[in-house]
Structures are given as C-alpha cells and as structure tokens.
C-alpha cells in the first residue's frame, strides 16, 4: 500500500475510534459486542490495518449514534479504495473495460515514463503478444474471456505514439526481450515491432542490459503519466499513486533506472541478439 493510502486508512481508523468513544463505548470489546463483530476486527480498523467496508461504516455510525457522519466517511473509504484497486474487482466484467478506462488518461498525458523489467509495455505490443498476455490474465483471475475486444482496446492506445506532441520515455530490462510470451513466432513478431517503433521521433526506448550496474533495485513495473499519476502493478492489485512526494520518488527511481539503460545502436543490438536466440 502507498504511504498516502496507509496514512488515510490510519486517519480513518482514528476518526472511527473517536466516534466509538463519543458514542459511549469506552472499549473496543464493548463496541464489538454491540456490532456482533470480533474484537480483533474493531482493533484492526481503528489501527488502520484493515479496510472498513461501506457497510462497516454505516453500522459503526449507527451504533455510535453518528448517522450524520456516514456520507463523509464513505467518501473517505471510496477514496482509499481508489488508491489500491484489486485486479479481481477491476476485471470482474473482463479485461476490455479496464483497457478502455485507460484511454482518457493517455489522451490527457503529455509525458510518459514507463518501466517494465520483465515484459514488453502494452502500448508497444503486437496484437499476437497482447492476446497471449490477456489469455494469461483471464486464466489467472478467472474472469470472462473477452480477449479480442481487450486486444482491440489496448492497440487503440498506440494511436498516441503517432499523434500530438506527446513524449514516451520507455525503459525495459533485457529480460523483457526474452520472457517467452506465446512462443517463438509471437516473440519474433514482437521483437521486430520494437525495432520498428524505435524510429519514432517521440519514443525514447532504452534497454537495461542484464550485466548493467544497477543504481536502484528493479522493483515492480510502473507507468508515470506526467507528474500527476503513477500506476504500479502487482499480482493482486493496481496501486494508484497521486501524492506529490511519492510521485517524486518514482520520478527519481525512473531516472536511476534510465541511467543503467542503453539506447540507439546498442539497444538495437540487444534486441537483435534476442531475435538470434530464437533461431
């Protein structure tokens, strides 16, 4: 969880603790008895170690005789949830809606900073490579199979590589060239695609060689949209970072990763070596 989300959750817990005491419940045990919850749940919520659901908030406020606080506290809960969105919830209707929701963000962004240590960034993917990644997502999260429409929405993002005055700063680790997604034929097509897009005037594509000296640990992939938003992907959720001091840390991390990357002819050489390895 980001520091911003953690701080907000802890602040929410402190506020609920005050409401509980003002409502006449001196102890968490007494409040747990009134709500028919485990005492540990009350403690976790008050100490910011567990998310309070909207239903939890409604019951809490009713028991604490503070119904006027429900609307405001639910708004706080929803904001915290926006900072940490579980993939299963985001993908409940398939992968395509999530891809479509990204389009307005891309339309508004002028400067992209992208780090991917293990796979090719989505906007640079071929249709075949993208299809294979979505098949993995669909199987892993057990969501509706909408591979074809998801691929179409992902490829729609590529229009921004050619339109407007946007700048794309993309850094991949060399491993991304070798992670086998879909087999040799799919990988050949994808690597050829990388060689082709490297000629685009608004795309800066760097590769961090496997033997490069790292100035910071690789960490998770992340995407920066101007200096307003960072999205970080994990297996369980997508972290949305909007707090300025946290965004500044990701900007610093990107600069350190970029310092280990090679560009131009050396980068093309690494892609060519990956192609040769496919036979």
Image (cartoon, rainbow, N blue to C red):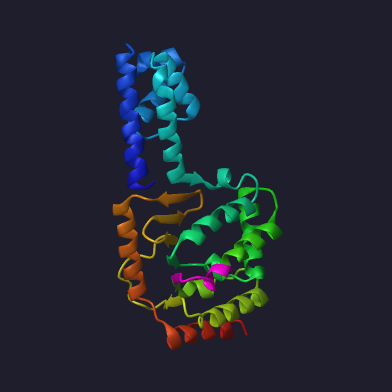
- Which quadrant of the view contains residue 252? bottom left
Residue depicted at 46% across the width and 36% down the height: 78
Judged left or right of residue 155, residue 60 is: left
In the rendered image, residue 163, in percent from the top left (x then y), is placed at: 53, 71
Q: Which range of residues does the magenta coloring cover?
A: 159-168
Residue 162 seen anywhere in this rendered image of the structure? yes
Judge by depth and name the residue closer to the eye, 70 or 207. Answer: 70
Q: How many marks?
A: 0
In the rendered image, residue 28, in percent from the top left (x then y), is placed at 34, 19
Q: Quadrant of the C terminus?
A: bottom right
Q: Quadrant of residue 80?
A: top left
User: In the rendering, at what x and y percent does residue 52 appear?
Assistant: 44, 30
**139 to the left or right of 17:** right
Residue at x 39% of width, y 13% of height: 65
Between 188 and 113, the one lying in front of the other is 113
Compared with 33, 194 (above or below) is below
For residue 191, side relative to residue 238 (left or right):
right
Whether residue 47 is situated above or below residue 265 in the rendered picture: above
The residue lying furthest to the front in this view is: 164
Q: Nearer the viewer, residue 263 or 156?
A: 156
**Can residue 95 be seen here?**
no
Question: Residue drawn at (30%, 28%), measured in percent from left and top?
Answer: 14
Residue 165 falls inside the magenta stretch: yes
Residue at 66%, 64% (x, y): give it: 131
Query: In which quarter of the view is residue 185 placed?
Result: bottom right
Magenta-span inclusion, residue 187:
no
Q: Is residue 4 above or below residue 37?
A: below
């Amino acid at each position: 969880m980001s520091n911003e989300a953690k701080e907000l959750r802890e602040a929410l817990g402190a506020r609920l603790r005050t409401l509980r005491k003002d409502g006449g419940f001196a102890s968490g045990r007494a409040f747990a008895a009134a709500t028919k919850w485990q005492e540990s749940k009350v403690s976790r919520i008050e100490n910011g170690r567990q998310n309070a659901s909207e239903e939890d908030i409604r019951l809490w406020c009713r028991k604490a005789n503070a119904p006027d606080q429900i609307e405001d506290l639910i708004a706080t809960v929803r904001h915290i949830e926006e900072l940490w969105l579980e993939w299963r919830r985001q993908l409940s209707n398939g992968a395509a809606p999530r891809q479509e929701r990204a389009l307005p963000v891309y339309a508004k962004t002028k400067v992209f900073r992208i780090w991917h240590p293990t796979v090719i960034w989505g906007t640079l993917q071929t249709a075949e490579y993208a299809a294979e990644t979505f098949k993995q997502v669909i199987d892993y999260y057990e969501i509706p199979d909408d591979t074809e429409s998801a691929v179409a929405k992902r490829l729609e993002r590529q229009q921004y590589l050619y339109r407007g005055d946007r700048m794309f700063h993309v850094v991949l680790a060399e491993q991304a060239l070798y992670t086998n997604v879909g087999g040799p034929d799919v990988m050949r097509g994808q690597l050829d695609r990388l060689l082709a897009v490297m000629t685009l005037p608004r795309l800066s594509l760097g590769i961090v060689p496997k033997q490069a000296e790292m100035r910071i640990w690789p960490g998770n992939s992340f995407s920066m949209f101007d200096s307003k938003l960072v999205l970080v992907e994990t297996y369980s959720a997508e972290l949305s970072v909007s707090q300025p001091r946290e965004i500044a840390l990701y900007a610093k991390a990107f600069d350190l990763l970029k310092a280990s990357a090679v560009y131009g002819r050396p980068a093309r050489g690494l892609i060519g070596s990956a192609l040769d390895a496919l036979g």
